[in-house]
Amino acid sequence: MKKIYTLVFVVFTFLSNTQNALSQAVVNLTNSNLPIIVINTLNNATIVDDPKVDAHMGIINNLSGINNITDPYDDFNGSIGIELRGNSTQNYPKKPYILETRDGSGNNLDVSLLGMPADNDWILLASFLDRTLIRDALAHYISESTGEWSSHSRYCELLVNGNYMGVYLLIEKIKRTNSRLNISKLTLQDNSGENVTGGYIYEVTGFSSGPGDFDLHRVIHYPKEDEVTTEQLNYIKKYDTDFRNVMLSTTYSDAANGYEKYINVNSFVDELITQEAMRNSDAYGWSAYFHKDRSNKLEAGPVWDFDQSSGNSTYKDGASTSGWIFPENDGYIPVFWSKLWSDPRFKYRVKLKWEELRTSKLSTANINSFIDSCAVLLGQAEVRNFSQWPILGVFLWRETDGYQYRNTYGKEVAYLKTYMTNRMVWMDNELNKVAVVPLSTDDTFDGNSLVKLYPNPAIDYLVIDTGEENTDLVNIQIYSNTGVLVQNAGLTTGNGLLRINLNSGLVSGLYHIKVASKDNKWYSGNFVIIR
């Protein structure tokens, strides 16, 4: 059953001459350095928002790097079902689509598209309001850099029923599969005990939910609305509600019975970092996903929807590179985000993860390099895209100051780079003010038992105490907070209490330790290095 949404009415103001240009533009695509996707609906049927219409899709992706419209379909050549997707984005002239690949009998067919893992559900993002065409890809790069799963994507140029539609991002739909969000599969019989505890995917959205969904703008995505049982829906609704109620209590930060009892804190740290680094005006309350695996805690993410982020919307003072998004409650942002930030331990974990990432994947140089690499890749295709959709320097909706002067693609890319640089520097300065607090070990890192670690924070050495006097320790591994092995002590003898020297190259940050005993029992814990 298709969800019924009460859409927010969105007003787009186009200059009259631009309106005419949008309707009259004709781009003749002959070749591209990007993959070319050609979609033709059966009997030239109009693509609508439900149901999916039958169509044929061909993808040209030559190894030579130059794709001619006359080349054979070498990446995919087969049947699909296609419909419009999105809420307010369906009002844009450049339409976003969702499609499913099918076999000759009309059944779902898992295929690999453009080198991405095989599946049957795909999305074509139009990125109409994002004149760089980069913001969504950048956000997924940042999220993946934190260690979370994030949708893979590929740029392409799209033709639908012979009409050139422009540059699109072919991207994985968020769903439960082994190659995407790898959580437990729920059957109709999984209604009690441990089985009913997962897995689930749901969304917090400003749009009204449909029949069978939660209340309070919470929408179930897995299991699907027409497949989820009453017991399953009641379970995940109660779990989410219990977490929210704890966050409203005076003991929400209690280590034993507060929020850490309900959520994987690292995932919430990662979600906040991605949303705030992009200063996404739609963060937390619109297209905000959560998932829960069987017998595990609730996790934030995966991230989605960044076309109005990083200075591309006046909503919530979006042009500013300063200020946090999560306190700017518009009636849709769950209050638990600001409550989490009020806990010194959570804030300190954000600080540690951010500082670690800023020395590596999220350095200013790496962010600028990622943006530049996308811009270079799109260097030819963007000309055709903005010939078809002449919106550079034109007011559309919620434009930030100076939009009229950013009348070339290069100026839009430069604006994004400057914005991201200034935004991350602001976050550097703000998180540098966060006070150091002791962090206790927790169970978010795999290991059979917890160890005591001191001094914590540490500088040059660490004492490991398993609490078991006669345990012989034989292997010690230290990981960064992004899961990279940074120190391996190898075979080391001990009796449950051991001091090790920390490598001098380890920078300040949060680390995980795994310790093995001779009987192959693993212990784990977290500690902080300050240097």
Image (cartoon, rainbow, N blue to C red):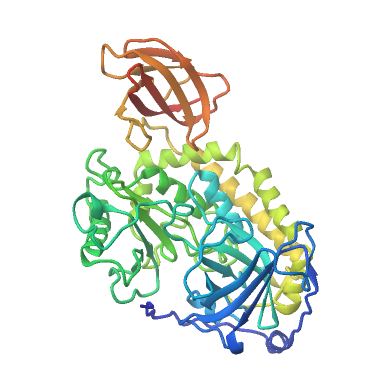
Residue at image position (58%, 61%) is 136
| Location of residue 112 in the rendering, given as x and y in whole percent from the top left corner | 58, 59
Q: Position of residue 290 (x, y in %)?
A: 38, 57
62 left or right, relative to 432: right
Q: Nearer the viewer, residue 438 or 197?
A: 197
Q: In the rendering, at what x and y percent does residue 271 appear?
A: 45, 51
Q: Does residue 166 appear left or right of residue 125 in this picture?
A: right
Question: Is residue 499 among what the camera can see?
Answer: yes
**Residue 304 or residue 233, whichever sits in front:** 233
| Above or below 313: residue 163 | below
Task: Please provide percent x and percent y for residue 70.
Answer: 78, 73
Residue 498, compared with residue 449, is above or below; it is above
Disc count in the image?
0
Q: Which quadrant: the N terminus?
A: bottom left
Question: Looking at the picture, does residue 26 appear above or below residue 327?
Answer: below
Identified at 53% across, 27% down, the residue is: 486
Q: Residue furthest front?
A: 105
- Pick whichever, 418 or 114, lies toward us: 114
Foreground residue, 506 or 364? 506
Please indicate, yes or no, whether residue 398 appears anywhere in the rendered image.
no
Q: Residue at x 56, y 66 (%)?
A: 308
In the depicted structure, whether residue 121 falls above or below residue 505: below
Task: Give the residue at x 51% y 62%.
Answer: 110
Q: Quadrant of residue 133?
A: bottom right
